[in-house]
Image (cartoon, helix red, strand yellow):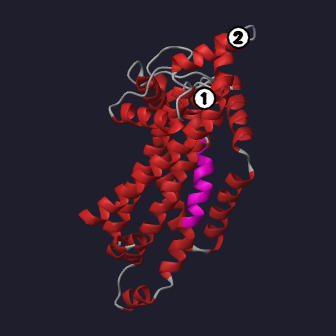
C-alpha cells in the first residue's frame, strides 16, 4: 500500500505542476492588458511598461513561474492585484463556502442514490420503473430552471427559505442551514439522477453473478445477499462515480453561486477571470487542482481497500 500511495501522490503532483504551469503560461500573454486595466484607459505606454517592470512581468515566463511556485510551496500565493488582500486566506474562505454547500449535497446524493439504486435493482417491475422515472426527471429538468422554480415556491410564495444570501455556520447554524437548503436540493436532484442510475446498473450486474445464485441455493436471505455481498462489490465503481459527482458539483458551483448570490469559490473565480487578477487566478487554480487530486487519491485508496486488485493498476 505505501508504494501505491506514493505512486498516486506522484501522479497528482505532476498533474498539479502541469496545470499551474500551463495556466501561468496562458496568463502571461495578458500581462500588458492587465496593466492597462489597472492604470485605466488614459495610461501612456511608458507608464504601462513601468508597471509591468515593477510587477516583474517583463521577466522570462519560466523564471516568474518558478518564483511563484517556490512562494506557493511556502504558503504565499501573493496578493490580489485589485484588493491587495492575501490570495491564500481569501481563496480558503471562499472555498469553505462552496464546500459547505457541496459536502451536504454529496452526502445526501450518495445516501439517496444508494437507496434508490439498490431498491430498483433488487425489486424490479414497477419499483424499477418508478426509480428510473425519478432519475429521468433529474436529467430532463435543467438545474437553472429547477433553481428558479424552487426559489419561486419556497422563497417567494411560501417564504420558508431565503432566496439569496449566505450565513456562515459559525455565526448562526440554523440560518446557515436555511441559506443552503435550496442550493443543496438543486445539486442533489441532479446528482441522484446520475448516480442512482450507475448504482442500479452495477447492482443488476452483481445480482446476476454466479456467487449470488450460490448464496441463494444455500438459503442466504435476500437482504443479506443484497446488502452484505452485492452492495460491497458494487461499491468500488460507485466510489469512482461519487468522486466524479463531487468534481461535477464543484465545477457547477459557478451557476449555483451566481443564482443564489453565494460568496463562494466559483463566483470568486469568475470575477477574478473577468478582472484579469493573475495572483488570484493562479491561487484558485492551485487550490482547485489540489482539491481534485486529493479527492481522486482518497477514491483510489478506498477502491484499493475494497478491491486489492485495484492497487496494482
Which quarter of the picture shows residue 210?
Answer: bottom left
At label 2, counting other C-alpha atoms closer than 10 Å, the crowd grade (few under 14, some 14-19, many 20 or more) is few
Quarter of the figure with residue 309: bottom left
Observer able to see residue 305: yes
60 relative to 13 in the view: left or right: right
Dot 1, crowdedness within 10 Å: few (<14), some or many (≥20)? many
Indicate whether residue 139 is drawn in magenta: no
**Residue 212 located left or right of residue 122:** left
**Residue that carries the numbered disc 1 in the rendered image:** 267
State which tag comes first along the sequence, 2 or 1.
2
- Secondary structure state at the residue bearing disc 1: helix
Q: Is residue 293 above or below residue 47?
A: below
* Residue 248, horizontal then vertical, whole percent: 58, 49
Label 2 – label 1 distance at C-alpha:
24 Å
Residue 141 vs residue 152, the one in the foreground:
141
Q: Residue at position x 70%, y 31% from top? A: 153
What is the quadrant of the C terminus in the image? bottom left
Count of picture labels: 2
Looking at the rendered image, the quarter that the N terminus falls into is: bottom left
- The structure residue drawn at horizontal position 49% and vertical position 14%, both measured from the top left corner, is 84
Q: Nearer the viewer, residue 233 or 118?
A: 233
The percent coordinates of residue 195 (x first, y second) are 56, 59
Which mark is on residue 40? 2
Residue 39: image location, x then y, percent:
66, 11
The magenta span reads 187-198
272 or 225, which is in the foreground? 272
Q: Give the mark toward the camera: 2 or 1.
A: 2
Element under label 2? loop
Amino acid at each position: 500500500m505505501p508504494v501505491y500511495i506514493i505512486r498516486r501522490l506522484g501522479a497528482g503532483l505532476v498533474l498539479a505542476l502541469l496545470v499551474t504551469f500551463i495556466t501561468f503560461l496562458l496568463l502571461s500573454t495578458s500581462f500588458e492588458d492587465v496593466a492597462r486595466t489597472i492604470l485605466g484607459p488614459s495610461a501612456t505606454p511608458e507608464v504601462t511598461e513601468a508597471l509591468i517592470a515593477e510587477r516583474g512581468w517583463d521577466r522570462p515566463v519560466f523564471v516568474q513561474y518558478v518564483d511563484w511556485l517556490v512562494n506557493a510551496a511556502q504558503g504565499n500565493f501573493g496578493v490580489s492585484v485589485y484588493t491587495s488582500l492575501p490570495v491564500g486566506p481569501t481563496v480558503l474562505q471562499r472555498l469553505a463556502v462552496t464546500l459547505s454547500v457541496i459536502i451536504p449535497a454529496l452526502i445526501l446524493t450518495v445516501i439517496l442514490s444508494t437507496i434508490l439504486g439498490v431498491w430498483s435493482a433488487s425489486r424490479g417491475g414497477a419499483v424499477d420503473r418508478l426509480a428510473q422515472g425519478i432519475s429521468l426527471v433529474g436529467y430532463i429538468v435543467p438545474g437553472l430552471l429547477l433553481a428558479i422554480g424552487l426559489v419561486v415556491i419556497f422563497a417567494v410564495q411560501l417564504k420558508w427559505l431565503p432566496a439569496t444570501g449566505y450565513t456562515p455556520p459559525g455565526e448562526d447554524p440554523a440560518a446557515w442551514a436555511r441559506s443552503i437548503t435550496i442550493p443543496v436540493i438543486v445539486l442533489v436532484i441532479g446528482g441522484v439522477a446520475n448516480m442512482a442510475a450507475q448504482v442500479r446498473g452495477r447492482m443488476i450486474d452483481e445480482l446476476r453473478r454466479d456467487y449470488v445464485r450460490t448464496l441463494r441455493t444455500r438459503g442466504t436471505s435476500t437482504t443479506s445477499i443484497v446488502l452484505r455481498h452485492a452492495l460491497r462489490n458494487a461499491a468500488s465503481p460507485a466510489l469512482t462515480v461519487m468522486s466524479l459527482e463531487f468534481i461535477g458539483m464543484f465545477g457547477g458551483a459557478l451557476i449555483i453561486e451566481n443564482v443564489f448570490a453565494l460568496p463562494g469559490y466559483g463566483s470568486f473565480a469568475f470575477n477574478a477571470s473577468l478582472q484579469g487578477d493573475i495572483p488570484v487566478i493562479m491561487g484558485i487554480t492551485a487550490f482547485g487542482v489540489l482539491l481534485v487530486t486529493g479527492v481522486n487519491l482518497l477514491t483510489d485508496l478506498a477502491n484499493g481497500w475494497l478491491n486489492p486488485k485495484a492497487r496494482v493498476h
